[in-house]
Image (cartoon, rainbow, N blue to C red):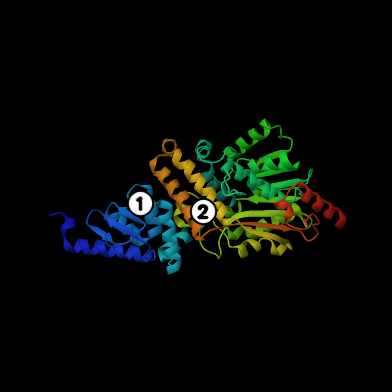
Amino acid sequence: MARSNFPLFHSVCGWLLQKVHKSIGHPRVRLSLGQDEAFPAADADVLATVSIADQRTLAALALNPEIGFGEGYSQGRIEVQGDLVRFLEAVLESIRSANKTGWHSKLISGWLDRMQANSLRGSARNIHHHYDLSADFYKLWLDPQLAYTCAYFPEPFSTLEQAQVAKMDHVCRKLWLQPGERVVEAGCGWGALAIHMARNYGVKVRAFNISKEQILIARERAKEEGLAGSVEFIEDDCRNITGSYDAFVSVGMLEHVGPQNYEHLGEIIDRSIGDTGRGILHFIGRNYPHPFSPWIRKRIFPGAYAPSLAQAVTILEPWDFSVLDVENLRSHYARTLELWLDGFEQSWEKVVQLLGIETARAWRLYLAGSIAAFRAGNLQLFQLVFAGAKCRKIPWTRAHLYSEQQVEQKDREWIRAIS
């Protein structure tokens, strides 16, 4: 007689299914093991069904639902019948309501903090893991400029390309960039924002990045656009920034820093722009301090940490920087990720060819889970604008962010009047 026919085996598996369901807050999802075991019952109203291949996978889920699910899904031992994003959103909402954080997740988070520390060497290793997969991979689902941060949608039905250009303009307008100014960018990706600032706002940019592949592509793009004299891409850690600038820009870099390095980052900003400059921190954040997803850190994004707004402000407070504006673009990031996932799925066969099926499934889960996290409010996207105490290049109103050139001209006249 097969082991699965023993009543004790059925009772243990059924108990484990119920345990897992309880640990994730009893969302409207069904967990099933083979043809015989499921919880809740088949007649329950559910959004999705999670099919678990074997008892080993079920045991891993019971020990740590997040790591167990992430690894099981990536390896094809877990399948979801139903909308993957909606399923993950329901689970995140139910876990938050139940206030569930298991000891095993805390233990793994502590271990990852040590193994993935963002030292100079550790940061290089972490960045290489995430960004140096292959530019060909990112080209399959990002916009043509390879902007890999939250876009800004002036209209709900803007294309991804339009929204990424709008994001770059939104950042530049918030900084009130003027022709001839010097800007330093900490973490520049494939160079889209640095090139945009130089081309459209007439500034000189020095952009730092420790991803060799990204820097090479950024330099080639600047050369093709005739902007090599206006944009300097430096393959180095932003902790080694030198020189004086009018503005400091960080878009999607703070997540790589970690709270233990915030004091040092504040020093870097202070020595870069002093008490007369201004800057922006654009980053994934949280409503309160909380460890980043252990599974995402393990599989996709090593060394990642999303700070609360209060934690981000501690970077600025010791140096007497004034916070001028805070905006939360959480819904814009959810929309950005939706379009990324659409492009990812449309290129699925090519993704599998480049990465292999297991890594491709891990990235699908990462993108889908990120959409769910922003929809559910587990993650936020903050833009924090700040300036030194003696900075006078501060617009009188926010009108310059949303209106035409005549309003921007009025703000310029106001700045000249008070300078």
Task: Answer yes or no: is residue 63 visible.
Answer: yes
In terms of depth relative to the viewer, which is nearer, 51 or 55? 51
Gap between marks 1 and 2 measured at Cα: 31 Å
Could you tell me residue 289's position as x and y percent? 55, 64
Look at 47% across and 55% down and name the residue there: 372
User: In the rendered image of this protein, does residue 94 appear above or below residue 187?
Assistant: below
Q: The disc labelled 1 sits on which kind of residue?
A: Val
**93 versus 257 height, above or below:** below
Q: Where's the C terminus, which quadrant?
A: bottom right
Q: Quadrant of residue 215?
A: top right
Q: Nearer the viewer, residue 7 or 336?
A: 336
Q: Secondary structure at mark 1?
A: strand
Marking on residue 80: 1
Q: Nearer the viewer, residue 357 or 266?
A: 357
- In the image, taking residue 375 as reference, residue 390 lies left or right, namely right
Lateral position of residue 292 relative to residue 311, left or right: left
Q: Nearer the viewer, residue 89 or 399?
A: 399
* Kind of residue indicated by mark 2: Gln
Residue found 84% across the figure and 52% down from its top: 413
Residue 283, percent from left and from top? 60, 54
Q: In the rendered image, which residue does mark 2 sit on?
A: 116
* Quarter of the figure that contains the N terminus: bottom left
First in residue order: circle 1 vs circle 2: 1
Q: Secondary structure at mark 2?
A: loop
- Residue 119 x, y percent position in the rendering: 58, 53
Left or right: residue 115 compared with residue 81? right
Residue 235 visible in the picture: no
